[in-house]
Image (cartoon, grey):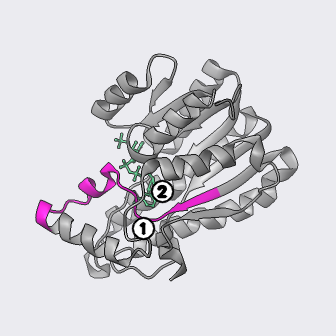
């Protein structure tokens, strides 16, 4: 129960889904935790769910100045940071001809640009050692229709995992990634699909997963705890695929 005892951790998008579950695991493992989110309703729900010891930060993951402000809030509250889980992200799925510039830029701003500048803003306060875990996706590896922009944004995160791991390890900062397959979270209800279409999409995705089911957020959180903890001290620039076998087809 003490695998993260004494660690100070920041989870972006820690108000629902994988981020919220990871926040619960981090707290149970003895970490001091801060989470970010944007939606006032889910920020409020996370505050009730996680309790008063968890710092809740309203911060838009797409905006560069907001990343600097978040880093400052973490410094003021914790004095430094041992673990960063870069998790906030959106999945907009649609055929290539239905994309416009604004939607493309929104996906990349939230999934790639904000994370990059958050890491940059946090560099002065990372402890030695520190661990950064990026939440990518199986969609960086497979040719699932309608995921061109989402998959490209996650492939960018995986590239950054490798390059930043090489750049930051000499400062004592490890960078690794998790790549989930389909996980049961509110992400799917945000796809803008009618209920019947959502059921059909979910059934189609599930039928492609060798394990025959969606994963649970805790199955990702457990891997993030490992990468965040000193148990993974020699794990650098790597990716753990947790996808029921989907990425290996
Ligand atoms: P989720 O329940 O929708 O969680 C997304 C989280 O990100 C929420 O806390 C959300 O907060 C936050 N977020 C989104 N846009 C934001 C913004 N602009 N600023 C600040 N926070 C923002 O979905 P999830 O499935 O847990 O997704 C978490 C991560 O896992 C994402 O990066 C996703 O791409 C990745 N992933 C998910 C799956 C899956 O099947 N579920 C598979 C592979 C990878 P608000 O409520 O405030 O928007």
Q: Residues within 10 Å of mark 2 (few under 14, many from 20)?
A: many
Residues 98 and 1: in front is 1
Left or right: residue 28 versus residue 16 is right
Q: Is residue 6 above or below residue 168?
A: above
Residue 97 placement (x, y as % from top left): 27, 81
- 227 relative position to 139: left or right: right
**Image coords of residue 165 (percent x, y):** 75, 57
- Residue behind mark 2: 111
Decide whether residue 193 is among the magenta residues: yes
Q: Quadrant of residue 248?
A: bottom right
For disc 1, does the CB lie below 8 Å from ligand 1? yes
- Label 1 or label 2, whichever comes before in sequence order: 2
| Residue projecting furthest to the top | 52
Q: Quadrant of the N terminus?
A: top right
* Helix, strand or loop for disc 1: helix
* Helix, strand or loop status at disc 2: helix
Residue 24 among those drawn in magenta: no
* Residue identifier under label 1: 150
Q: Residues within 10 Å of mark 1 (few under 14, many from 20)?
A: many
Q: CA distance from mark 1 to mark 2?
A: 8 Å
Label 2 beta carbon within 8 A of ligand 1:
yes
Q: Residue at x 77, y 42 (%)?
A: 230
Residue in the image at 27% along x and 75% along y: 204
Q: Magenta region: which residues?
A: 177-196
């Amino acid at each position: 129960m003490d695998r993260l005892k004494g660690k100070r951790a920041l989870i972006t998008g820690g108000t629902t889904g994988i981020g919220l579950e990871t926040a619960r695991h981090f707290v149970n493992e003895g970490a001091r935790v801060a989470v970010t989110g944007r939606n006032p309703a889910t920020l409020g729900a996370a505050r009730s769910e996680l309790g008063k010891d968890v710092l809740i930060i309203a911060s838009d993951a797409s905006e560069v100045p907001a990343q600097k402000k978040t880093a400052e809030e973490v410094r003021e509250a914790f004095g430094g940071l041992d673990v960063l889980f870069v998790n906030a992200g959106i999945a907009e799925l649609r055929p290539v001809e239905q994309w416009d510039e604004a939607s493309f830029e929104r996906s990349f701003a939230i999934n790639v640009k904000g994370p990059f500048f958050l890491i940059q803003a946090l560099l002065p306060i990372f402890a030695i050692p520190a661990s950064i875990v990026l939440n990518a996706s199986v969609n960086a590896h497979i040719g699932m229709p309608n995921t061109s922009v989402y998959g490209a944004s996650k492939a960018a995160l995986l590239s950054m995992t490798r390059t930043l791991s090489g750049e930051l390890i000499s400062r004592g900062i490890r960078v690794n990634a998790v790549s989930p397959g389909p996980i049961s979270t509110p992400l799917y209800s945000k796809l803008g699909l009618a209920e019947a279409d959502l059921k059909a999409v979910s059934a189609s995705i599930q039928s492609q997963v060798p394990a025959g089911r969606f994963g649970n957020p805790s199955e990702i959180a457990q891997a993030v705890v490992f990468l965040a903890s000193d148990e993974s001290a020699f794990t650098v620039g790597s990716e753990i695929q947790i996808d029921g076998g989907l990425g290996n087809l």
